[in-house]
Amino acid sequence: MKYYLGIDGGGTKTTAAVADENGLLFKREGKTINFYSVGMQIARKNLSELICEIESELKINRFESVFIGCSALDGEADEELVKTLCSDVIDAEKIKINSDVYIALKAVGDAICPCVAICGTGSMAIAQDFSGNIHITGGWGHIIGDEGSAYAISLRALKLCCRQFDKGEDTPLLKSALKFFDVTDFRKVIDVIYSDKTTKDVIAAFATKVCELACGGDETSLKIIQTEAQKFADTVLILLKKVKVCSLLGLYGGVFENNRIFVEFFSEKIRESFPELSIKIIDVPPEESALNLARDL
């Protein structure tokens, strides 16, 4: 029996799907394999733990083919990188690694010049033109880019909290930050934010609280969401104008899936330039798209 493995390596978690020749068998979640975020050693460790769980559960130790979408990449990985991440971790006849936006793009289907915008812990957009060429915008990482992402939303909110605290203001956003980071004095948030244990996904998770406040009518939080939605819309519009013709913009990632206000404002800004464009949440899980790509290797 041949076994196939598809992996979606996002900025916060990694999801794997396994199939045999008859269909889907198993799914399992693990920690991120974004080696720019956690380092190659930790990425290999996280991948190894996930693979060991899968092999133990299914009583297998080798795959026919593996396709990995990794949020650390914006294109296909070369053989050296594949070996660096996967050697002695995955035993497979064939292994390919590309970006997580690539596997999302392949989940769209037969749309004309499809475009996919991913907005989760990080953000990035990808499209395929009439000639089959792949174009990418965004994906610069949390330090110099990732507009609209959960990390960017959280960072903007935290910076505003710092200003509010310095002014002696008592706001819903500041109260939410105190509770979320489990501190009674906002100055103590410095110890949390700059701790070696606080990874970017921990900071990014605060975006859910900002969204809750925005949905509840907090004008400050609403402005944060709208500002970041506008910034990511600008990134996606650059891509759409580059490919010129696009029948579908697929949306994927936690910010789109869990933030109604963000989706509405983002879509409104896109349709100002592309009023006829179909915009929808992608309903094919990216790990299953990666699994389909693994079968085709």
Image: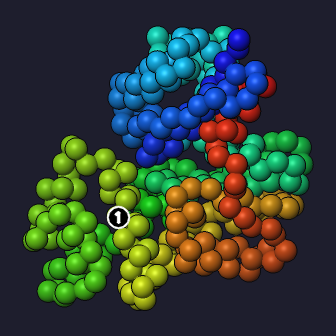
Identity, as a three-letter code, of the amino acid under mark 1:
Phe
Rendered location of residue 197, percent (x, y): 22, 44
What residue is shown at x 16% (from left), y 60% (from top)?
190
| Structure colour scheme | rainbow
Crowdedness near tag 1: few (<14), some (14–19) or many (≥20) residues, C-alpha within 10 Å: many
What residue is shown at x 85% (from left), y 42% (from top)?
132
Q: Quadrant of the C terminus?
A: top right
The image quarter in which residue 171 lies:
bottom left
Rendered location of residue 73, percent (x, y): 56, 38
What residue is shown at x 56% (from left), y 56% (from top)?
253
- Looking at the image, residue 246 sits to the left or right of residue 134; the answer is right
Q: Quadrant of the N terminus?
A: top right
Compared with 216, 76 (above or below) is above
Q: Nearer the viewer, residue 284 or 119?
A: 284
Residue on which the image places disc 1 = 206
Compared with 87, 184 (above or below) is below
Is residue 70 visible in this depiction of the protein? no
Say which element carries label 1: loop
Compared with 243, 77 (above or below) is above
